[in-house]
Amino acid sequence: MSQLLHPLDELYRRAESAMDPAAWAYLNGGAVDELAVRRNPDRFAEIRLLPRVGVDVSALRTSQDLLGIELPYPIMLAPAALQRLFAADGELGTVRGAKAAGATAVISMESSVATRELAGEAGPFFQHIYVQKDRELTLELVRMAEEAGARGIAVTLDNPVPGIRYRQDAGMLGLPEGVRRANLESGGVPRLTGGYLDPSMTWRDLEWLVAQTELPIIGKGILHPEDARFAVEAGLQAVYVSNHGGRNLDTVAHPIDCVRAVSEVVAGRVPVLLDGGIRRGTDVLKALALGADAVLIGRPYVWGLAAAGAAGVKSVVETIRDEFLAAMAMCGLASLADITPAVIFGEEG
Ligand SMILES: Cc1cc2nc3c(=O)[nH]c(=O)nc-3n(C[C@H](O)[C@H](O)[C@H](O)COP(=O)(O)O)c2cc1C
Ligand SMILES: CCCCCCC(=O)C(=O)O
C-alpha cells in the first residue's frame, strides 16, 4: 500500500530524484551537524494553536501593503542562489511561479540568471545583496537593482564569513559548466575578484548603504532584539528575522523563537519578516501571531522548481497559502489584524 504524502513531501521526493546529488546536498544541507536545519521546522511543529469559535470567517482579509507592494497574503520567497543548479530554467521558473501565485520573490545577488533578465518576467520583486569589500561594486549592484525595477534591497547580515558546510563541501567542488553568477559578470557589473563576503561590515556601512538609494533596505539575518533596534536606528526599512535556514551557524537560535522579542523592540516602526523552517500554513499563522508581518519560504519552493518548474513553485506557495487560510478560519481569525499571540496555546491569558 502506498503512503499518502503531504504535497510538499511529494515535491521533495520528486526533486531529489530529478537532481544531481551534489546540488541536492547544497540545497538541503547546512552548517556542521545540521541541527539548526532540522530543528527550524520542528520548532514550529512544537507550538500549539488555540482556536476561538463562533466568529464570522466567511471573508478572510489577508492583503497588506509591504514597502509599497500590495501582498495578497503574507507569503514571499526567500533569496536562494544559483538556481540553475536545481532546474534548467533556474530563477526564471521561480519568478514566473511566484508571479502566478501572487507571491513577491527576493532575487539573490548570486542568481544564475541575471536580475535584468528576470525583471520582465517577474511580478514586483526585491533584490538581495551581500555588501562587498569593494564598496564601488556594492554600489553597482544597488544601481543594477534600481535599473531592473527592484522594489527594495535585502542585505544579508548573518554571513560575515562562509558557513562551514560539510555536506555541501563533500559534493560540490565548483560550479558546473553552464551555471554562472550572472549578476556579477554581465551588463557592467564586473566579476568579483575576492570573496563575496566582507567580514568587516558594521552598522556604519549599513547607514552608508541606506544613504545611497531611495529603495528601502531590508536587514536579513537578525535574531537579537538589540540588533533589531540598531537596524531601525540605522535607517533600515524592514527587519528580516532569519538564521539563514541553518546554513551558516549550527545550534543557532530559531527564528520563530526570536521573532516576538524582535517585534516588541521594532514596535511597528518597520515591517518584520521571518524565514527558516516555514513548511506548513500553520507555520505562517504562528509566525504572524508571534510578531512577523510576513514570512518567506526557502528550500520548499526550490523543491517545487526542481520537480515541476514554475508550476512547482506556484504549487508550493498555493499549498502553504491554502493551509494558512484554513488555519485562520479554524482559529476564528478573519483578518491579519486579528492574528495575535492569543492564538498560541499558553499565551491566551
Ligand atoms: C540553495 C540556497 C541558497 C541560498 N542563497 C542565499 C543567498 O544568496 N542569500 C541569502 O541571504 N540567503 C540565501 N539562502 C538562505 C535563504 O534565503 C533562507 O534564509 C533560508 O533558506 C530559509 O530557510 P528554509 O530553507 O528552511 O525555508 C539560501 C538558501 C538556500 C536553500
Ligand atoms: C559562490 C556563491 C555562493 C552564494 C552563497 C549563497 C548563500 O547564501 C547560501 O546560503 O548558500
Image: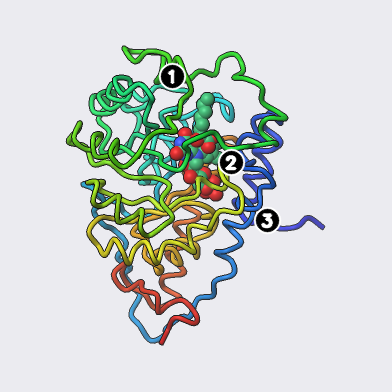
Q: Does the residue labelled 3 lie within 8 Å of ligand 1?
A: no
Q: Mark 2 points at which residue?
A: 303
| Residue at position x 33%, y 55% in the image | 228
Residue highlighted by disc 1:
182
Task: Look at the numbered disc 1 and give the secondary structure of its residue.
Answer: helix
* Residue pointed to by mark 3: 5
Q: Is residue 203 shown above or below 74?
A: above
- The Cα–Cα distance between marks 2 and 3, rounded to whole angstroms, is 15 Å
SS of the residue under disc 2: helix
Give percent across and percent down for residue 77.
Answer: 43, 44
Tell me which label, 1 or 3, sits earlier in the chain: 3
Q: Which amino acid does label 3 sit on?
A: Leu
Quick check: 248 left or right of 296?
right
The local crowd at label 1, few if under 14, some if 14 to 19, many if 20 or more residues have their Cα within 10 Å, is many
Say which element carries label 3: loop
Q: In which quarter of the image is residue 324?
A: bottom left
Q: What residue type is labelled 1?
A: Ala
Task: Give left or right: position of 75 versus 204.
Answer: right
